[in-house]
Structure formats: C-alpha cells, structure tokens
Image (spheres, rainbow, N blue to C red):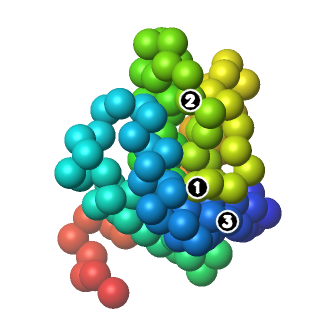
Amino acid sequence: MWARRILGLVLLAMGAGKLSDVGGYANALMAFRVIPAGAVHAVAWAWLAAELVAGALLLAGKGRAGGALALVINVAYAALTTQAYARHLAIDNCTCFGVHLRQRLSWFVLAQDAYMIAFSAYVFVVARRATPRRPAGSPAR
C-alpha cells in the first residue's frame, strides 16, 4: 500500500534527522518547556527510536503495528506543539527532523501535525481492516 510506504519513509527520515544530532535535538526540545532537563535526553532517544521502529515496521509490511505506533507518535507530537503554540512560546525549530529543516512553530506546523495524525490513522485503519480476524476459539498461529 502506497500510504504505508510513504508514512514509513517519512518516519524513518524524521528519526534519522534526530539521530544525526541527538544532543541538538534534545536542546531543541527544551524550548517546549514541558520536559524536565534531567529527562530530555532520554525522551529524545525514546522519541527518535519510536519513529525509526514505526518507520521500519511500516516498510516491512506491518501496517497495523507501525500505524498504531505512528499514530501515538503523531498525537504526542501534536500535543507538544499545540501546548507550546497555545502558550505563545517562541519556538524556532519545531524539531520534526531534529536540527535539520528548521521550521518556526506556527499554525502551519499545527496543520501539518493534524495531517500526520489523519494520515497515520488512515494507514492504521486500512491495515486493521485488511488483517483477517480469527474466529473465537480458533488456535493461534
């Protein structure tokens, strides 16, 4: 499915961008003022790892698991950016691709977040519908 592959590639690019400079990514996350300084590096590593895993799952044909993880990542990211936008924080780097392709936090970033949530939900729902359901009581394979 083309949507699963595109989403997988985007997530891999996002994770790779963050992986190329984890320290810079962690510093950029501090601008959102919600992650404690002592936890920001762990959050940065966990976030980029989740993106890489989700992207790999999607490209490996695991649309249900990859789509679910992508949906969680994108909802969490939207919560991060929306709270910062609502608090009128001046964020110079939305951190979508780590320190690369910087984009100032604006309504446009929030629209991109909404699109990514919808796209992830679409991939997950399509994959879920395509997965055959086992009848109750049937043995697991």
Quarter that holds the C terminus: bottom left
Name the residue tied to disc 3.
13
| Contact (Cβ within 8 Å) of mark 3 with mark 1 | no
Residue 105 spot, x, y in % from top left: 62, 28
Residue 34 spot, x, y in % from top left: 31, 32
Camera-side residue of 101 and 79:
101
Among numbered discs 3 and 1, the one appearing first in the sequence: 3
Alpha-carbon neighbours of circle 1 within 10 Å: few (<14), some, or many (≥20)?
many
Among numbered discs 3 and 2, the one appearing first in the sequence: 3
Above or below residue 59? Residue 73 is above
Q: Residue at x 23, y 41 (%)?
A: 36
Mark 3 is on which residue type? Ala
Camera-side residue of 81 and 36:
36
Name the residue tied to disc 2.
91
Q: CA distance from mark 3 to mark 1?
A: 10 Å
Q: Residue at x 35, y 30 (%)?
A: 33
Q: CA distance from mark 2 to mark 1?
A: 13 Å
Q: Which mark is residue 141?
A: none
Q: Secondary structure at mark 1?
A: loop
Mark 1 is on which residue type? Gly
Camera-side residue of 28 and 45:
28
